[in-house]
Amino acid sequence: MQLLSFILFYPLIWVISKLNFRVLYVVSDLLFYFIYYVLRYRRKTGYNNLKMVFPDKTTEEIKEINKMSVINSTDAFVESFKSLNISEDEMKSRFKFKNIEVINEIEKKNQSMILLCGHFSGFEWMFIIDRYIKSNFYAVYKRLRNKYFDKLVKRIRSRYNGRLIHTKETRKRIAENSKTDSLNIYGFASDQTPRFQKAVYWNYFMNIWVPIHTGAESIAKQHNLALVFMKIKKLKRGYYETTFEKITTTPRDFKDYEITDKYMKLVERAIYTTPELYLWSHRRWKHRDKTTPSK
């Protein structure tokens, strides 16, 4: 069944990847209409999340942000397919790194790092970062259930020498790499909800008490990795600009969870600035009622 699904859908993906951008976004508009108005996929989840996070916004404002979030998500979805055939020069012209020197300065000190980002639209094209750095780039991801589509995702994201690490393999791979002389950058998106049974740390995120991932901080301390926050800005359809903010190059100097808190505050700031770019369809706050805030 997995192979059959892949055989049926891959020709469509290939065709989409060959479209010019004007037609590509027509496809995105049609996909948005189907998801938002026909399937209504997680539309209520997005609305409820936004209403919870922005209680002072009007119903119309919430609906507009929710709608724009889905539009940006469908844009990112078709752009990921376009990655199959987009040229390197065009990718560079559409995905800019405003202050890549933040990364380069850490590399000059011969220190590997963790690059932290939130679930914002546009991250699919960030693999072009390989052309601006000396380090090997790894992205931590959740493996797809369909092994054929999983291989396709790996092929798309490795066009510019990017490597994917499954979530369950992360600690082992980083530990192995730390024994070598190679410089490495590990991309983490750690703003979503961890499994309740494995939650070890809770704090406020967007003024709501929730469990928070702490893996990036603990790994950074274990292997003395620098931590950098990456913020993506959508300039216009099909064009993005990324800025970097150094969190620390000395993670062992921080008390437990201080780095995690600092990172989550950066995500919050990015959300407040451009809420329409955030992935609101995910049930990020689903565990909010399962424990009591600490005094």
Image: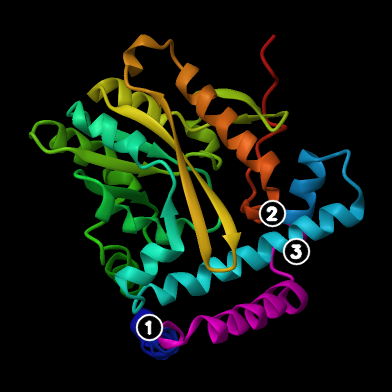
Residue 44 in the magenta stretch? The answer is: yes
Say which residue appears at 75% left-offset and 64% top-offset. Answer: 67
Residue picked out by circle 3: 67
Disc with the residue nearer the chain's start (1 vs 2): 1
Query: Going 46% across and 55% down the picture, which residue do you hit?
Result: 123
| Figure coloring | rainbow
Name the residue located 45 percent from the left edge and 44 percent from the top edge.
189
What's the CA distance linking mark 3 and mark 1? Answer: 29 Å
**Dot 3 or dot 1, earlier in sequence:** 1
Give the answer, above or below, for where 40 lies relative to 59: below
Give residue 6's mark. 1
Spatial separation of the CA atoms under disc 1 and disc 2: 31 Å
Q: Secondary structure at mark 1?
A: helix
**Which residue is at a point 86% across and 53% down the rendered structure image?**
61
**Residue 204 image position (x, y, % from top left):** 66, 25
Q: Position of residue 188 (x, y in %)?
A: 40, 42
Magenta region: which residues?
Answer: 16-45
Does residue 120 appear in this view? no
In the figure, is residue 46 to the left or right of 125?
A: right
Kindly indicate the quadrant of the structure image that contains residue 285: top right
Q: Mark 2, residues whose alpha carbon is within 10 Å: few (<14), some, or many (≥20)?
A: many
User: Which quarter of the image is occupied by the N terminus?
Assistant: bottom left
Q: Amino acid at mark 3?
A: Lys
Cβ–Cβ under 8 Å for marks 3 and 2 = no
Label tally = 3
Residue that carries the numbered disc 2 in the rendered image: 276
- What is the C-alpha distance between the residues marked 3 and 2? 8 Å
Q: Nearer the viewer, mark 3 or mark 1?
A: 3
Kind of residue at disc 2: Glu
